Image: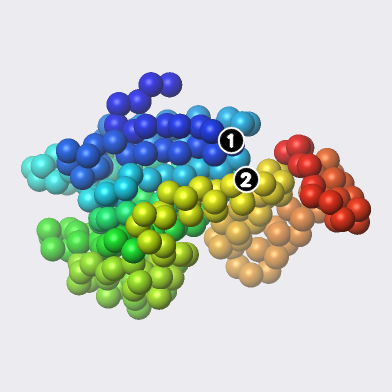
Amino acid sequence: MAYETILVDIADGIATVTLNRPEVLNALNGQVFNELGDVALELGADPSVQAVIITGGDKVFAAGADIKQMANLSAVDAAIGGRPSHRAFSLIETIPKPVIASIAGFALGGGCELTLVCDVRIAADSAQFGLPEIKLGILPGAGGTQRLPRLIGAGKAKELIFSGDFINADEALRVGLVNKVVPADQLREETLKMAKRFAARGAVALRLAKSAIDEGLRMDLEAGIQYEHKCFSLLFATVDQKEGMRAFIEKRPPDFKGQ
């Protein structure tokens, strides 16, 4: 599928999706959200893709929503206009493969919310994060008030959302917003290294591990444990489980088939 606001590259089982609106600091609008949702469906169904990277490039991740597009919306318009972002973020969040956000420069507003729907976040030391919507008289409307507290805790999330202030990469690492911070000139290399490490694992086990974590977080502990056990048991019907354990016993690297 052809896209206008994003670039898609697939190589060696790794799909890289790059936001491509540099003239507006990768500001997110309806078209971007529609294309992100479509590419999430495409990559999720592509058996050649084992992991996905989402990035804005070397200078900026995404500096939020396109405020000019939002300024004169009515309440009804805002309700309707929010649907593409909710669709896109839900589809990215449920890609049945590891999704890594590779973040340089600003990740603000909707850009910060986009990082939250990824499984893992790796940031350049140049990165800055923030949800500044409160300074515009609104609140984060693409899942930020729900996903951020689940990731870093309610108290810190409320501080960031109530103030609208930015935090740098080191603070983001300290509070658990990102998994790793690297020098800016190493961001691409380190992100690709992480993606390849994930992609080398068994695809079926990865899919079910992600499902066990994400679905389990929506359940009480006992229900989550039961769901995990179901996922665990199902893996013993796979080719990869047999290969993985045989390779361990034979002291050799496994040759996973994704089956």
Asked if the residue at tag 2 contacts the one at tag 1, i.e. Cβ–Cβ closer than 8 Å, the answer is: yes
Crowding near pointer 1: few (<14 within 10 Å), some, many (20+)? few
Query: What residue is pinned by disc 2?
Result: 199
Q: Quadrant of the N terminus?
A: top left
Looking at this rendering, what residue extends furthest in the bottom direction?
A: 155
Say which quarter of the image contains residue 26.
top left
Q: Is 239 or 153 nearer to us in this picture?
A: 239
Q: In which quarter of the image is the C terminus?
A: top right
Residue 82 left/right relative to 214: left
Instruction: Give the answer, above or below, for where 175 lies relative to 8.
Output: below
Q: Is 226 or 34 nearer to us in this picture?
A: 34
Element on which disc 2 rests? helix
Measure the C-alpha gap from mark 1 to mark 2.
Answer: 9 Å
Residue type beneath disc 2: Ala
Residue type beneath disc 1: Asp
Q: Which residue appears at 41% of the width and 55% of the height?
A: 186
Q: Which residue appears at 81% of the width and 53% of the height?
A: 233
Q: Where is residue 164 in the image (x, y as percent from the top left)?
A: 20, 67
Element on which disc 1 rests? loop
Query: What residue is pinned by disc 1?
Result: 12
Q: Position of residue 31 (x, y in %)?
A: 28, 32
Q: Which residue appears at 17% of the width and 41% of the height?
A: 24
Q: Which of marks 1 and 2 is in front?
A: 1
Q: Is 203 or 181 nearer to us in this picture?
A: 181
Q: Which residue appears at 29% of the width and 36% of the height?
A: 20
Say which quarter of the image contains residue 47.
top right
